[in-house]
């Protein structure tokens, strides 16, 4: 099982390099627990995470990347990992006033 993300900056027409991303896991008793944190690489990607089954969220620090232009200072994408044999890819398409995500391949 692996997890990756790819952030594309739609306003600039290029990958969102250097954007801070945190991976959290839902613990029913204690709420959200941080699992890992890093920054996107020069191609806007984070790869190699292996969070295991359960409910997770990726938290993107959009204000840290976009600065004062960020209408959404943070984007949190919550998802569920059911099959540990699959690869999970969660792309984010970002602009100062909008974002979109989906389950990629």
Image (tube, helix red, strand yellow):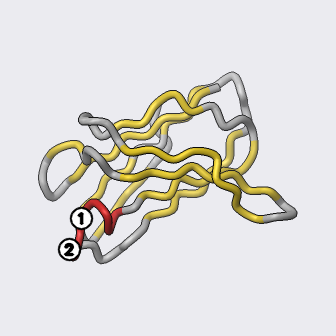
Q: Is 4 situated left or right of 9 in this image?
A: right
- How far apart are labels 2 and 1 at the CA level? 6 Å
* x and y, in percent, of residue 17 in the image: 25, 44
Query: For the point 30% across and 77% down, which residue is it?
Result: 71
Query: For the point 51% across and 62% down, which residue is it?
Result: 76
* x and y, in percent, of residue 102 in the image: 46, 48
Residue 49, by quadrant, is top right
Q: Quadrant of the N terminus?
A: top right
Q: Is 55 situated left or right of 59 in this image?
A: right
Q: Is residue 72 above or below residue 84?
A: below
Name the outermost residue toward the right: 29
Looking at the rendered structure, the secondary structure element under dot 1 is: helix
Q: Determine contact: label 2, label 1, CB under 8 Å.
A: yes
* x and y, in percent, of residue 57 in the image: 59, 54
Name the outermost residue toward the left: 12
Residue 74, by quadrant, is bottom left
Query: For the point 29% across and 47% down, which residue is it?
Result: 18
Residue 67, by quadrant, is bottom left
Looking at the rendered structure, the secondary structure element under dot 2 is: helix
Name the outermost residue toward the top: 85
* x and y, in percent, of residue 45 in the image: 36, 36
Query: For the point 22% across and 52% down, which residue is it?
Result: 9
Q: Is residue 19 above or below residue 15?
A: below
> Relative to the observer, which residue lies in front, 50 or 80?
50
Q: Is residue 69 above or below residue 31?
A: below
Report the residue marked by disc 2.
Answer: 69
Query: Callout 2: 10 Å neighbours few (<14), some, many (20+)?
Result: few
Report the residue marked by disc 1.
Answer: 66
Q: Is residue 100 above or below residue 53?
A: below
Query: Callout 1: 10 Å neighbours few (<14), some, many (20+)?
Result: some
Q: Is 99 situated left or right of 29 in this image?
A: left
Disc assigned to residue 15: none
């Amino acid at each position: 099982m692996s997890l990756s993300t790819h952030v594309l900056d739609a306003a600039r027409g290029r990958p969102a390099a250097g954007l801070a991303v945190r991976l959290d896991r839902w613990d029913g008793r204690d709420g959200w627990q941080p699992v890992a944190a890093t920054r996107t690489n020069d191609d806007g990607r984070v790869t190699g995470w292996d969070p295991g089954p359960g409910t997770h969220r990726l938290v993107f620090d959009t204000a840290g990347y976009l600065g004062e232009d960020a209408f959404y200072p943070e984007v949190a994408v919550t998802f569920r990992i059911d099959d540990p044999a699959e690869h999970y890819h969660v792309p984010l398409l970002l602009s100062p006033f909008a974002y979109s995500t989906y389950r990629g391949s």
